[in-house]
């Protein structure tokens, strides 16, 4: 059925004048509301105010304007049912064939610093979602448009088909409309939920409200389909907002490693580098310069660093870029790059060069929650942002750690938090020199860290993400040259483990905090 009447009520005026001008040029009558109407009037486009159409003025400061039977009957009437058309004719209600609506800027409002609940609530649209849902429900007869990006295609289709749209187009736009209103409601629900403190600190309901940002070639393996999703309404942040300066598209595994690497370097105030392979650090260090931090990190395990992702919490210098260009890596990510550094890295054909502030977290619930899928549901926990409280640390051995050992213990503890459990990190001079990850027994992780080490362990320290269940870990570490240990404590055999450390002359600190990472 040819569209004769269009209703336009938009908050975002992008493309409004061009759209309305095209519709008017096709002889389509336009109904519009306050702000949209004023824009059309200023542009010299004829329209009929909704209040004139309904015979009822806008009231309550515009809260009530389109909630009227003459509007909704015109939208909801089925054009293929004679009874509906007869009712419209009897009541002198013209059928509305096109509804163009976008909603009050609720999300933009709640992003503003210091916004009050009253300000946010006032931006909850009522009439808009009602119009959209009515038109989408009746998409067999009515075309609904919620995004300015679709204006052009609608004008083109109307022009080419004598003022009609296809059922296929209407169905596609109806799905987009329902998704739009569902996401809008989820944003409102999420905001109001955030104002209510649950006893356990977690939301009573979880609406992730995600939209696909990019399709990926495949998932962890070629037989798995994959995509990157981001929050539809939150401020950008995290790896989903990273800017790619060079290289081919990122893979599923690249994104996982980018996230792991950025989380690790975020731990440090000092200049830091993290080298990540298969979601585990295979090297990490701090240094006076970016180049020094990188070379120290690389010394931990240069073999595993091949094909890795390398992150920094400082801009990459030309000198660091020259060293990086000597190694094949999947990606480099940093807050910025000095003049000339990108050009040097560009010479590596397959490298991805990413610009990302490691401190810029997403502005939505994903910044606070760690979410994992299980069959039939989700497991949700708070992000493990805790590291240590020096007041809670306790030296439990006869020997106190030296100042140099304590510095390395703190460094190792930061790295250990980001290693898959069971996790062991050997550190010296604020450099990881041996990392044992993902073993089923803790003593095997100690042995693996020793095997992976490519430098002398004499005088190094050891960090463990959880307690030692037996003394064998202490004995193994002491045999390798370890001089100090940091671990949470809490084992039923703590006294036995402490005694072993004392026998071997080790200093040991209990943190009282565990950092499992499965």
Image (cartoon, grey):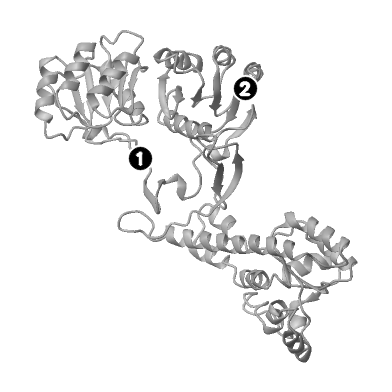
Per the image, label 2 sits on a secondary structure element best described as: loop
Q: Quadrant of residue 514?
A: top left
Q: CA distance from mark 1 to mark 2?
A: 33 Å
Q: Quadrant of residue 417?
A: top left
Q: Is residue 284 left or right of residue 112?
A: left
Q: Quadrant of the N terminus?
A: bottom right
- Is residue 213 visible in this depiction of the protein? yes
**Label 2: few (<14), some (14–19) or many (≥20) C-alpha neighbours in 10 Å:** some
The residue at which mark 2 appears reads as 350
Q: Position of residue 208 (x, y in %)?
A: 49, 53
Q: Position of residue 502 (x, y in %)?
A: 11, 18
Q: Is residue 425 left or right of residue 8?
A: left
Give the tally of numbered discs: 2
Query: Which label sits in the foreground, 1 or 2?
Result: 2
Per the image, label 1 sits on a secondary structure element best described as: loop
Is residue 170 depicted above or below 271 in this figure? Answer: below
- Is residue 358 visible in this depiction of the protein? no
The residue at which mark 1 appears reads as 384
Give the residue at x 56% y 12%. 319
């Amino acid at each position: 059925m040819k569209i004769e009447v269009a209703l336009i009520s938009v908050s975002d005026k992008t493309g409004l004048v061009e759209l309305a001008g095209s519709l008017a040029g096709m002889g389509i009558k336009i109904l519009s509301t306050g702000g949209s109407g004023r824009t059309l009037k200023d542009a010299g486009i004829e329209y009929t105010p909704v209040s004139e159409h309904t015979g009822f003025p806008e009231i309550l400061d515009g809260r009530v304007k389109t909630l009227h039977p003459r509007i909704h009957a015109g939208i909801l009437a089925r054009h293929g049912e004679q009874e509906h058309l007869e009712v419209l004719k009897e009541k002198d209600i013209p059928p509305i064939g096109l509804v163009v609506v976008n909603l009050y800027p609720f999300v933009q409002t709640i992003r503003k610093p210091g916004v009050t609940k009253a300000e946010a609530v006032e931006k909850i649209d009522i009439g808009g979602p009602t119009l959209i849902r009515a038109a989408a429900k009746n998409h067999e007869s009515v075309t609904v448009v919620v995004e300015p990006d679709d204006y052009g295609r609608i004008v083109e289709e109307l022009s080419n088909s004598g003022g009609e749209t296809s059922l296929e187009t209407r169905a596609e736009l109806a799905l987009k409309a329902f998704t739009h209103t569902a996401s809008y409601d989820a944003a409102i629900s999420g905001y109001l939920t955030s104002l209510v403190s649950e006893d356990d600190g977690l939301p009573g309901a979880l609406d992730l409200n995600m939209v696909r940002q990019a399709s990926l070639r495949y998932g962890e393996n070629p037989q798995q389909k994959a995509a990157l999703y981001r929050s539809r309404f939150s401020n950008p942040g995290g790896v989903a907002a990273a800017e790619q300066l060079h290289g081919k598209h990122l893979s599923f595994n690249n994104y996982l490693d980018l996230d792991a690497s950025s989380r690790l370097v975020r731990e440090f105030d000092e200049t830091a580098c993290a080298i990540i392979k298969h979601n585990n650090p295979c090297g990490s260090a701090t240094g006076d310069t970016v180049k020094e931090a990188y070379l120290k990190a690389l010394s931990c395990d240069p073999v595993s660093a091949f094909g890795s992702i390398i992150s920094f919490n400082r801009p990459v210098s030309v000198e660091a870029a020259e060293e990086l260009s000597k190694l094949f890596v999947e990606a480099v990510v940093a807050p910025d790059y000095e003049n000339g550094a990108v050009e040097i890295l560009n010479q590596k054909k397959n490298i991805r060069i990413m610009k990302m502030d490691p401190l810029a977290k997403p502005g939505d619930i994903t910044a606070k929650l760690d979410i994992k899928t299980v069959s039939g549901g989700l497991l949700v926990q708070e992000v493990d942002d805790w590291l240590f409280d020096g007041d809670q640390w306790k030296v439990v051995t006869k020997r106190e750690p030296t100042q140099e050992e304590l510095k390395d213990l703190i460094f190792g503890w930061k790295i250990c938090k980001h290693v898959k459990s069971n996790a062991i990190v050997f550190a010296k001079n604020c450099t990881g020199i041996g990392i044992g990850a993902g073993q089923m027994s803790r003593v095997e992780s100690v042995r693996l860290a020793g095997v992976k080490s490519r430098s002398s362990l004499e005088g190094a320290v050891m960090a463990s993400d959880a307690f030692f269940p037996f003394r064998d870990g202490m004995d193994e570490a002491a045999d390798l040259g370890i001089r100090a240990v940091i671990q949470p404590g809490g084992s039923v055999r703590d006294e036995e483990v402490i005694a072993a450390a004392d026998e071997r002359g080790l200093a040991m600190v209990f943190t009282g905090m565990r950092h499992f990472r499965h």
